[in-house]
Image: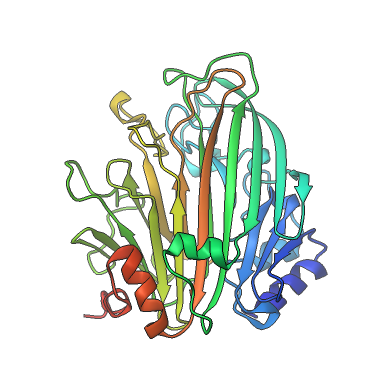
Amino acid sequence: MGTYGYDSDFLKTHAIEFLELASPDGQSKVLIAPGYQGRVMTTTAAGDTGDSYGWLNYKLIQSGELNPQFNPVGGEERFWLGPEGGPFSLYFKPGVEQVYSNWIVPPVIDTERYDIAHRDSQSVKFVKQAHLSNASGTPFDLRIEREISLLDANATAAVLGRPVPKQVKAVAYRTDNVITNAGNEVWTREKGLVSIWLLCMFNPTPSTTVFIPYVTDTKGKILNDDYFGKVPEDRLIAENGTVFFKIDGTYRSKIGLPAGRAKGICGSYDSQKKVLTILTCTMPEKEAPYVNSKWGHQKESEFYEGDVINSYNDGPVEDGSIMGPFYEIETSSPGAALSPGASMRHIQTIIHVQGEDADLDPILYDLFGLNLKKVSGIFTH
C-alpha cells in the first residue's frame, strides 16, 4: 500500500475502468478513470514501485455502493462546478435549508461517466453534456470538455523555469477544462453564474505543509479561514507574502485566498517523503467575479466574493468519524457570464518532484522565494 502499483491493481481488482498516460521510460504515470468523471485518480514519478500521490477511498470503492447524496471515491484531481452554497448553489434545491442532510452533489460531477472524445499515449479528452439548476431555480445547459495531458521534460521545465535534475523523480500533467453555454439563455450575475472548480486530494502526513503566496500591495483580507471555525494559530501562519497551512489529517479546517490576493500558484511539501508538489492555475487578466460557495444566507455584496485557491485539511467531525484522512488543494475559475455558444476555460498544472533537498531547494526558491527548511520548520517552533 502506498505505491502506484498497489493502487492500479486495487482499481483493476474492483473492476474500475481506467487508462494511463505514461512517459516513454514508464516512470511518470497518470491514472485516469472515465467512469469517475475523467478524474485523475493518482500519479507516480517512479513507475509501479513509486509513491502513489493521490488519495483513494479504498473502503468506498471496495464496497461497490452508490450513495444518492455523494460518492467520495477520492482522486488526485477531479472536475466539479461551483458555487456549492448560497442563493446560486448547484448542490441545494430551491427553498431548502442549506445543511448537510439537504446537500446533494449533482450526478454529472459525482456518478456519471464522461465520454472519451480523443486519446493517445500522452493525452485524453473527455466530453459531457449536462443540465443543472441552481437554488434560485435558474437552469443551465452546458457542455463540459476536459483534456488531460502528461507533460514531458521540456514542458515541465517551462513551468518550473529550470530543468528538473536527472536524479530527481518527477511527474507533471495539465488539465484543460472548458464549459460552454449550450442553452438559449444568457448566463447572468443576477440569476447566478457557474464556475469550474478543480479539487485535488492528496495523502497527508505529520510533516506536510501547504504554502500559498499572496499579493501584498492591496487592501482587504488576506484569506478566509473560518469555513469550519477559525483555524488555530499553530496551524495557520500568514507572513511576508506567504500563507502556511499545517497538513496532518487530524484537524478539519479549510482556508481560501480571494481573487485580489491569489497569484495562481501554490504548493505543498512533505519533508518525510521529500515530495514537493507545485500547482498552478490560469487567472483572468482583469478583475472578475468569483462565486461564493459559503452555505446558507449571503448578503448580495458577498455573492461574488469567492476564493480562487483553497486548501482543506481533513480531520474527525463531531461524531469522531473521518472520511479520509486526506488533504485538498483546490482552484476555481471566475463565474462564467456566457452567451449561448460561448465558453470559459480553466487550466491547472500539477507537478510532483521527489528528491533530496539540495536538488529541490532551487526549484522552490525560483518559484516562491522560499527554502525547504523554512517550509518544513514553520510549525515546529
- Quick one: quadrant of the N terminus? bottom right
Foreground of the two, 254 or 279: 279
Answer with left or right where residue 258 lies relative to residue 143: left
x, y percent for residue 380: 26, 80
Decide if residue 322 is in sight here: no
Residue name at image x 46 percent, y 43 percent: 332
Residue name at image x 29 percent, y 48 percent: 224
Answer with left or right where residue 99 lies relative to residue 246: right
Judge whether 369 appears above or below 301 on screen.
below
Q: Residue 104 lies in what quarter of the image? A: top right
Judge whether 307 appears above or below 130 on screen.
below
Colour mode of the rendering: rainbow
Foreground of the two, 83 or 173: 173
Q: Residue 303 lies in what quarter of the image? A: top left
Foreground of the two, 316 or 364: 364
Residue name at image x 67 percent, y 75 percent: 4
Judge whether 214 appears above or below 59 on screen.
above
- Quick one: quadrant of the C terminus? bottom left
x, y percent for residue 279: 45, 59
Decide if residue 249 is in sight here: yes
x, y percent for residue 14: 80, 66
Answer with left or right where residue 231 lies relative to residue 207: left
Residue name at image x 60 percent, y 61 percent: 151
Judge whether 6 appears above or below 243 on screen.
below
